[in-house]
Amino acid sequence: MRQNLQNGGRLRPVDLARGHGLSTQAVRNYEEAGILPAAGRTAHGYRTYTPLHAGALSAFLALVPGHGHRMATSVMRAVNEGAVDEALHLIDESHAQLLDDRRTLQAVESALRDLEPITASEPGTGSEPAAVPGSGGTFIGPLAGMLGIRPATLRKWEGAGLVSPRRDPLTGYRVYDEADVRDARLAHQLRRGGYPLEQIAPLIAQVRAAGGPEPLEAALVDWRGRLSARGRAMLTGAAELEAYLRLRG
């Protein structure tokens, strides 16, 4: 790739494609999408490319791992249309999303660390007894008291899918088992961190799918690794984009 950029001269579609491990059709598709500047044409109508096109393709392929295909496409289109400020704004938005994802991960990790067993024998509030006889569950009033929230908040969380209590067949009261208490505790920690219910719901779903906080630890390690890889990929993409901007002058 770098050799093409230094040598100058015209490049055939196959030259540009091979230099980046792509097919010639992929190169044509990228040109049509605005990722590459428009190609020149020979007297017979064949496409010809230059080191500028090679630089654009290198920049795009370097941007994709950190920003995703859609964002990388939008950035390259903006640059090729001369809207560099717009392209940089898009880059800033992508970095802001990465930071937000990091903060979400930190909030989940913090919430999981702060989870503590809540026993039904602890005093609560409301008219219901603390525990459901023989069930190992607790009612809404005692659980709300343990968390320091109102029962109405737990009902709202139920509507948002954060907790799924069953109903006691004798009293009709909501019964929260150990998993429900865990989910309520996690939701409470995330709400205290300022996260809206629509962002908390998928995180609670991940905990349930993993079978609890402990199995989720491996997923969190993988999540952190992917965020780090994304951040480093953004650095690589920034370097290639800067090189392309210099080529454009």
Image (tube, rainbow, N blue to C red):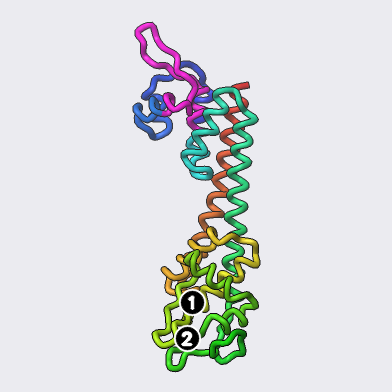
Residue range corresponding to the magenta coloring: 30-58
CA gap, disc 2 and disc 1: 9 Å
**Quadrant of the frame with the C terminus:** top right
Residue at disc 1, secondary structure:
helix
Rendered location of residue 23, percent (x, y): 35, 31
Residue at disc 2, secondary structure:
loop
Query: What amino acid type should be assigned to the residue bearing mark 1?
Result: Asp
Mark 1 crowdedness (10 Å alpha carbons): few <14, some 14-19, many ≥20: many
Closest to the observer, 214 or 167: 167
Q: In the visual, does 89 lie left or right of 212?
A: right
**Residue that appears at 49% across and 66% down:** 159
Mark with earlier residue (2, 1): 2
Rendered location of residue 106, percent (x, y): 61, 63
Residue position for label 1: 180
Residue position for label 2: 137
Q: In the visual, does 34 lie left or right of 231?
A: left
Q: Residue furthest top?
A: 43
Rendered location of residue 240, percent (x, y): 56, 35
